[in-house]
């Protein structure tokens, strides 16, 4: 997963060196970058499942309707449940029903952000695909957008002291402004608090409402304006039956 055009590798390198000098934990960084708006704007997703299933059947075959039915059943069952239970069950669902696959193998592209329809249709995906599917599911279940961030990180391979890293994406859930974020990861099924993910160096985070640099509570602006892949996947999700 390469850096988006709007974020250069040099920026990530400078940020990592600054983090090391400051000796700040991932928890502190995310607490800043995931800070809620002073006046949160409630935001959710509505899914037209009839439209979704019609396209899923056309593109991937009738057999894939079974996993869609399981997904829909889960989302309906989560309505009104405690948020942490929603997070746990949605995280578990995608680890049960998806297998990890690189974009180059699945889509013939270096970096492709798939919609939930494409991800469930294939039953495969990489880190962004897991994150987007979990994010949309949590929004549909009723979790407010202000509590969720798609976090672009550098993941150190081989542990927190490793000098080898790669671009990666995780999803963060922060119940309250003072709560420690929980990290939902495609490579690790367990939900872990941010302080335990010292192998991750955050670069920036975003959701439907905006985009933030790591360590800053001040939005950089519109996420769809700054991230072309994010804008593109939102447009495709809307064509598949999702609306904000």
Image (spheres, grey):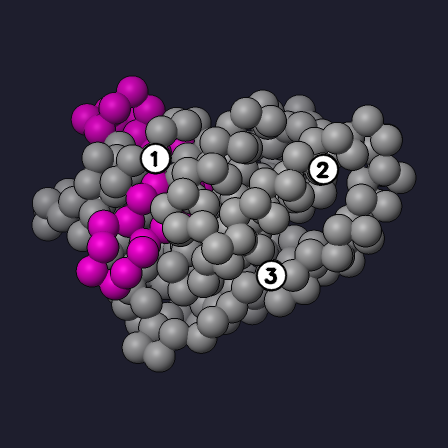
Pair 2/3: label in front: 2
Residue 97 as seen in the image, left or right of residue 127: right
How many residues crowd around disc 1 within 10 Å: few (fewer than 14), some, or many (20 or more)?
A: some
Precedes in sequence: disc 3 or disc 1: 3
Q: Gap in Å between the C-alphas at discs 2 and 3?
A: 18 Å
Is disc 1 placed on a helix, strand or loop?
loop
The image shows residue 12, relative to residue 226, as above or below, that is above
The x and y percentages for residue 236 are 72, 55
Q: 14 or 78: nearer the eye?
A: 78
User: Which residue is found at the position 31% from the left and 44% from the top?
Assistant: 182
* Residue under pointer 2: 69
Residues drawn in magenta: 154-183
Question: Which residue is labeled 1 in the image?
Answer: 191
- Helix, strand or loop at disc 3? loop
Q: Residues within 10 Å of mark 3 (few under 14, many from 20)?
A: some
Residue 128 at x, y = what percent? 53, 41
Judging depth in this view, the residue of 103 and 5 nearest the camera is 103
Residue in the picture at 25% in, 24% down = 159
Q: Position of residue 146 (x, y in %)?
A: 40, 64
User: How many marks overall?
Assistant: 3
Answer with left or right where residue 31 lies relative to residue 96: left
Cα separation, mark 2 vs mark 1, equals: 25 Å
Real-space Cα distance between discs 3 and 1? Answer: 23 Å
The residue where tag 3 is placed is 45
């Amino acid at each position: 997963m390469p850096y988006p055009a709007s974020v250069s590798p040099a920026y990530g390198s400078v940020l990592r060196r600054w983090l090391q000098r400051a000796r700040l934990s991932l928890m502190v960084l995310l607490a800043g970058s995931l800070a809620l708006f002073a006046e949160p704007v409630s935001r959710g997703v509505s899914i037209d499942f009839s439209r979704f299933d019609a396209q899923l059947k056309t593109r991937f075959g009738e057999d894939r309707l079974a996993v869609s039915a399981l997904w829909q059943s889960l989302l309906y069952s989560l309505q009104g449940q405690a948020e942490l239970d929603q997070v746990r069950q949605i995280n578990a669902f995608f680890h049960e029903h998806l297998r990890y696959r690189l974009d180059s193998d699945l889509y013939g592209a270096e970096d492709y952000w798939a919609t939930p329809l494409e991800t469930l249709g294939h039953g495969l995906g990489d880190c962004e695909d897991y994150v987007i599917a979990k994010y949309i599911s949590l929004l549909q279940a009723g979790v407010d957008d202000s509590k969720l961030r798609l976090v672009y990180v550098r993941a150190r391979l081989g542990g927190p002291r490793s000098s080898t890293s790669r671009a990666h994406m995780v999803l963060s859930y922060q119940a309250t402004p003072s709560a420690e974020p929980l990290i939902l990861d495609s490579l690790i099924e367990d939900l872990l608090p941010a302080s335990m993910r010292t192998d991750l160096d955050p670069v920036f985070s975003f959701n439907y409402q905006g985009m933030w640099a790591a360590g800053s509570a001040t939005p950089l602006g519109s996420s769809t304006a700054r991230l072309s892949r994010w804008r593109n996947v939102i447009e495709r999700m809307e064509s598949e039956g999702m609306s904000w």
